[in-house]
Amino acid sequence: MASTSRPPALSRQEIDHALARLAASPEFTSSNQLRRLLTFLVHTALEGRKDEIKETVIGVELYGRTPGYDPKADGVVRTEARRLRPKLTQYYEGTGRNDEIVFSLPKGGYIPEFSPRITPGPQDQPAAPVPDPPQLRDRTRRLPAWWAVAIPLAILGLGFAVSRARVQTQLVRVPHLLDLGLPTVRTPVFSPDGTRLLISVDNAGESHIWIHDLKSHTNRQITTGDGRDYVPAWSPDARAVAFLRRSTMEKSDLVVKPLDSGQSRTLGVVERVLPIEWSRDGRFLAASDVTAPGGPTAIFLVNVETGARRPVTSPPPASTTLSPGSRPPVTNSPSSAD
């Protein structure tokens, strides 16, 4: 009967390290929504709040839905969970195939599981190879002479490929846990040059936007006041940031703040607290909002200078909520957004 080694207990640091490595992998760097969902579920479970991991709670806290919303009409949580499960499988078949900790999301629920990878015991090792029969050994002695050259060349090529693979493996940077010295941190976004992090920080019932310098390890608070600021985004030249400021329980202001002058401008109001994106030329913002009171959610392009906006998607009344975090096509210069 096969035996396996007993899985060791996992520390919070080990789990956070494994989660950071997964989040920085090629499979998840292009899936911001799935990365946010898994991080939210794992952190909530580690904080001992598994009883709060419910569809409606996730919808309100992670996707900005209004408390009391109907999950049957708005299935964003179910949709993202269905996308997350095969993405985890893809990761552990690729970049994470050697990870020591495995995350999973069982079907029918939202409470994540994380456990050490089970290593095979001695009885699970493959059996020793059976020697070739005498007849086969006799045949190999009569192989053509060119095999004496082909076999060493093949072995040499295999050795070169293995050595190259080892070198490439050694060049992979292993993610490490970053201590920002701040309370609850949400939605971190790297600056275009990769030297700073733009984050929202929750503290004492408020949420403000901060910048963390990765070289000097210093923090700078960008917004203040009694408001709640969420989902920040860098401009392409990193000279300004955009974010959503919750003005009421149902509405949020779309705000742009230059980092040099500090004068914030409100471009409009939206009813969805979902990720926002800048166009590559910095002239427009892509944001999610309802097409009409009680209607479905669409993606709008908002002119950064004038605040004028136009929809770029036309969802049917019963469609799934969309957000710019799903990477919609945002062009450099829309033909008519003014």
Image (cartoon, helix red, strand yellow):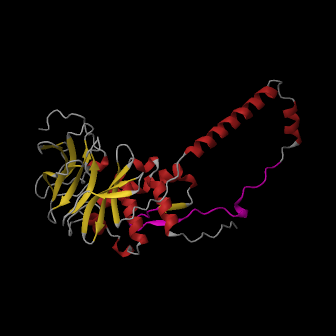
- Mostly what secondary structure, the magenta segment? loop
Q: Is residue 276 above or below residue 156?
A: below
Q: Which of 154 and 330 lies nearest the eye of the viewer? A: 330
User: Residue at left 34%, top 62%?
Assistant: 185
Residue 221: image quadrant is bottom left
Question: Is 109 a magenta residue?
Answer: yes
Percent position of residue 279, x then y:
25, 40
| Image-based side of 157 in relation to 146, left or right | left
Q: Is residue 238 above or below residue 334?
A: below
Percent position of residue 70, x then y:
21, 66
Percent position of residue 303, x then y:
15, 42
Is residue 283 among what the camera can see? Answer: yes
Q: Is residue 155 above or below residue 24?
A: above
Question: Is 47 a magenta residue?
Answer: no
| Image-based side of 129 in relation to 108, left or right | right
Is residue 82 among what the camera can see? Answer: no
Percent position of residue 145, x then y:
83, 24
User: Residue at left 60%, top 70%?
Assistant: 8
Residue 202: image quadrant is bottom left
Q: Which residues are magenta?
A: 104-130
